[in-house]
Amino acid sequence: MLNTHKIDYLKRHNFNPEDFREVDMVTGICTMKSGVRHRIVEKYSRIMGYFQTISAANIGKRAEFRQRRFFNIKNFLKRC
Protein backbone atom coordinates (compact mmCIF):
# COMPACT_ATOMS: atom_id res chain seq x y z
CA MET A 1 0.00 0.00 0.00
CA LEU A 2 1.35 3.41 -0.96
CA ASN A 3 1.27 6.24 1.56
CA THR A 4 0.23 9.79 0.65
CA HIS A 5 3.84 10.95 0.08
CA LYS A 6 4.46 8.22 -2.47
CA ILE A 7 1.13 8.89 -4.18
CA ASP A 8 2.00 12.59 -4.48
CA TYR A 9 5.46 11.65 -5.78
CA LEU A 10 3.93 9.54 -8.56
CA LYS A 11 1.32 12.16 -9.46
CA ARG A 12 4.00 14.85 -9.64
CA HIS A 13 5.76 12.73 -12.28
CA ASN A 14 2.51 12.11 -14.23
CA PHE A 15 2.06 8.47 -13.21
CA ASN A 16 -1.18 6.84 -12.08
CA PRO A 17 -0.58 5.66 -8.47
CA GLU A 18 -3.13 2.85 -8.87
CA ASP A 19 -0.76 1.12 -11.33
CA PHE A 20 2.09 0.82 -8.82
CA ARG A 21 2.62 -1.50 -5.86
CA GLU A 22 5.97 -0.21 -4.55
CA VAL A 23 7.88 3.08 -4.69
CA ASP A 24 11.41 3.73 -3.45
CA MET A 25 11.64 7.51 -3.22
CA VAL A 26 15.39 7.44 -2.48
CA THR A 27 16.45 5.59 -5.64
CA GLY A 28 13.44 6.62 -7.75
CA ILE A 29 12.67 3.00 -8.64
CA CYS A 30 8.96 2.27 -8.90
CA THR A 31 7.52 -1.22 -9.32
CA MET A 32 4.24 -1.58 -11.17
CA LYS A 33 1.62 -4.20 -10.27
CA SER A 34 2.60 -6.08 -13.44
CA GLY A 35 6.18 -6.40 -12.13
CA VAL A 36 7.72 -3.86 -14.52
CA ARG A 37 10.17 -1.48 -12.85
CA HIS A 38 10.66 2.19 -13.75
CA ARG A 39 13.27 4.66 -12.59
CA ILE A 40 12.05 8.23 -12.25
CA VAL A 41 14.68 10.75 -13.34
CA GLU A 42 14.49 14.36 -12.19
CA LYS A 43 15.01 17.10 -14.77
CA TYR A 44 16.49 20.37 -13.58
CA SER A 45 16.15 23.77 -15.18
CA ARG A 46 17.15 27.27 -14.24
CA ILE A 47 13.89 28.75 -12.95
CA MET A 48 13.76 32.25 -11.48
CA GLY A 49 17.53 32.51 -11.10
CA TYR A 50 18.29 29.15 -9.49
CA PHE A 51 18.14 25.48 -10.44
CA GLN A 52 14.94 23.66 -9.55
CA THR A 53 13.34 20.37 -10.55
CA ILE A 54 10.81 20.67 -13.35
CA SER A 55 8.34 18.53 -11.40
CA ALA A 56 8.40 21.03 -8.52
CA ALA A 57 7.78 24.06 -10.78
CA ASN A 58 4.35 25.57 -11.24
CA ILE A 59 2.12 24.69 -14.22
CA GLY A 60 3.17 27.73 -16.26
CA LYS A 61 6.89 27.05 -15.90
CA ARG A 62 6.42 23.38 -16.82
CA ALA A 63 4.54 24.42 -19.98
CA GLU A 64 7.31 26.90 -20.78
CA PHE A 65 9.93 24.15 -20.40
CA ARG A 66 8.03 21.85 -22.81
CA GLN A 67 7.90 24.62 -25.44
CA ARG A 68 11.65 25.32 -25.37
CA ARG A 69 13.73 24.58 -28.43
CA PHE A 70 17.13 23.10 -27.68
CA PHE A 71 20.26 23.77 -29.68
CA ASN A 72 21.51 20.79 -31.68
CA ILE A 73 25.16 21.17 -32.70
CA LYS A 74 24.99 18.35 -35.30
CA ASN A 75 22.16 20.05 -37.21
CA PHE A 76 23.98 23.37 -36.99
CA LEU A 77 27.19 21.92 -38.43
CA LYS A 78 25.30 20.25 -41.29
CA ARG A 79 24.00 23.66 -42.42
CA CYS A 80 27.48 25.24 -42.42
Image: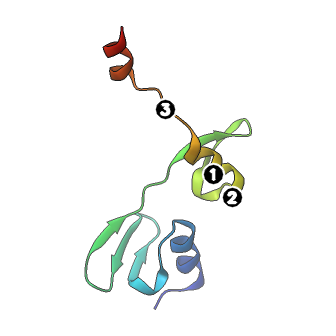
User: Farthest bottom residue?
Assistant: 1
Residue 70: which numbered mark, if any? 3
Labels 1 and 2 touching (C-beta < 8 A) = yes
Cα distance between the residues tagged 3 and 2: 20 Å
Q: Residues within 10 Å of mark 1 (few under 14, many from 20)?
A: few
Tell me if label 3 and label 2 are in contact, CB under 8 Å: no
Q: Position of residue 53 (x, y in %)?
A: 59, 51
Label ID, residue 63: 1
Q: Earlier in the sequence, mark 1 or mark 3?
A: 1
Q: Mark 3 falls on what kind of element?
A: loop
In the current view of this chain or complex, which residue is farthest to the front? 79
**Picture layout, residue 24 above or below residue 43:** below
Q: Please report the residue visible at 39 percent of the width from the left and 17 percent of the height from the top.
A: 76
Which amino acid lies under the numbered mark 2 shown in the image of this protein?
Ile
Disc assigned to residue 31: none
Q: Mark 2 highlights which residue?
A: 59
Work out whether residue 63 can be spotted.
Answer: yes
* Residue 69 sits above or below residue 10 on the image: above
Q: Residues within 10 Å of mark 2 (few under 14, many from 20)?
A: few
Is residue 63 found left or right of 31 in the rendered image?
right
Q: Residue visible at 45% across and 65% down? A: 26
Residue 32: image location, x then y, percent? 33, 80
Q: Position of residue 4 (x, y in %)?
A: 59, 83
Vertical placement of residue 58 versus 29, above or below? above
Spatial separation of the CA atoms under disc 1 and disc 3: 15 Å
Instruction: Give the amino acid type for the residue marked by disc 3 in the picture.
Output: Phe
Tag 1 secondary structure: helix
Q: At x 27% / y 84%, what residue is drawn?
A: 34
Estimate the x, y position of residue 19 in percent, counting from the top left.
40, 84
Q: SS class of the residue under badge 2?
A: helix
Residue type at numbered disc 1: Ala
Q: Residue at x 42, y 61 (%)?
A: 40
